Amino acid sequence: MKAAVCREFGAPLSLEDVTIAAPEGQAMKVKINACAICHSDITYMRGGWGGTPPLLFGHEAAGTVVETGDGVTSFAAGDRVVVTLMRSCGTCPSCGDELEAICATPPAINEKIITDSADAPVITAMNTGAFAEEVLVHERQCIAIPDELGFDEASLLGCGVITGFGAVTRVGKVQAGETVAVIGTGGIGINAIQAARIAGASTLVAIDTAADKDALARKLGATDFINPAAENAQERIMAITNGTGLDAVFVGVGSSKAIESAIPMVRAGGRIIIMGMPASDDLASIDASDLSGSAKTVIGTKMGSAMIREDIPKLIALYQQGEIALDELISHRFTFDQINAAIDMAASPASSRVVITF
Ligand SMILES: [Zn+2]
Ligand SMILES: [Zn+2]
């Protein structure tokens, strides 16, 4: 099968013929029909989190089960699924605390999954490797989807949508009437906006340096839009909240600068939720006396602390009821052989979500 392999950080991906193993145990092979490009893929393929190429990225996907290992109990060939990077055991202390994204003992699958034409292993990053025609994943990484849900829309449920929703509902626990801002209206942030609107936020400020994100953010629930490149975001937040600051700020951009900017935006007793994943060496500088003196809380979350078996079916139902948008989040579609152009577009502020179709 074809895969877009990262041979060198920062270089274009290399479209190659590779071999994928047959599934063992609870592994299953899924034919990929759509894969969105997440900013985490871009950070990783530019070397932001280390590792040693060759690596295979792509972790926000949807497809069709083609083959199951003999231990698979929940799926059969032909099932349509969302594929996520979340491989959890379901029984360790983290899973028991409803934190499957930080499962302490994720179950293993085939040791060798992908080999290249020289029979050398290619590592599937983030448990997935969906920049390829097929993936081999654990059955607990997948959630069934109904026939009427398109693969393109479904792929977004694998990462961006659950992260933004989980951050708001499970981590930030936004209550009706609260004042909220979301920094960065990309794949995660735009979904935090949808979730905060449904939670009943009375003021919902979208903050993004791309001025053309204004319309979609407002359509999905933002009451205000601030472009921090054009105006002083802190002053505007204080004006909007009559000088008190916000109840909660969600940071969807994986950058220490965005995190630093969020802390003075919240009121005394307010909370800052970090959703985007910065590069490993990106250190934030924080006024510790503001945190303690004003009793502010900074909370990190991986994958919005989502529990995929509960959250993805719930989000599909919300989509079918017209409560959340998925298709409108997709600004560009590319075919698999155009993956490098798709990645450039995903990295550009001109795009919303970019999906590769197979
Ligand atoms: Zn992601
Ligand atoms: Zn676990």
Image: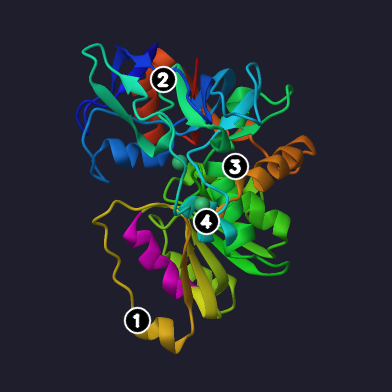
User: What secondary structure do most residues of the magenta stretch adopt?
Assistant: helix
The magenta-colored residue range is 255-265
Q: Gap in Å between the C-alphas at discs 4 and 2?
A: 31 Å
Indicate the amino acid at tag 2: Ala
Question: Separation of disc 3 and disc 4 at Cα?
Answer: 40 Å
Q: Secondary structure at mark 3?
A: helix
As measured in the structure, the alpha-carbon distance from the residue carrying label 3 to the one carrying label 2 is 30 Å
Q: Residues within 10 Å of mark 3 (few under 14, many from 20)?
A: some
Q: Is mark 4 within 8 Å of ligand 2?
A: yes
The image position of residue 253, as x and y in percent, is 41, 52
Look at the picture and state if 152 lies above or below 293: above
Q: Quadrant of residue 121?
A: top left
Q: Which residue is mark 3?
A: 216
Between label 4 and label 2, give the one nearer the viewer. 4
- Label 4 sits on a secondary structure element that is loop
Q: How far from the left and from the top, in percent, is residue 15?
A: 31, 15
Q: Earlier in the sequence, mark 3 or mark 1?
A: 3
For the residue marked with disc 3, what is the amino acid? Leu
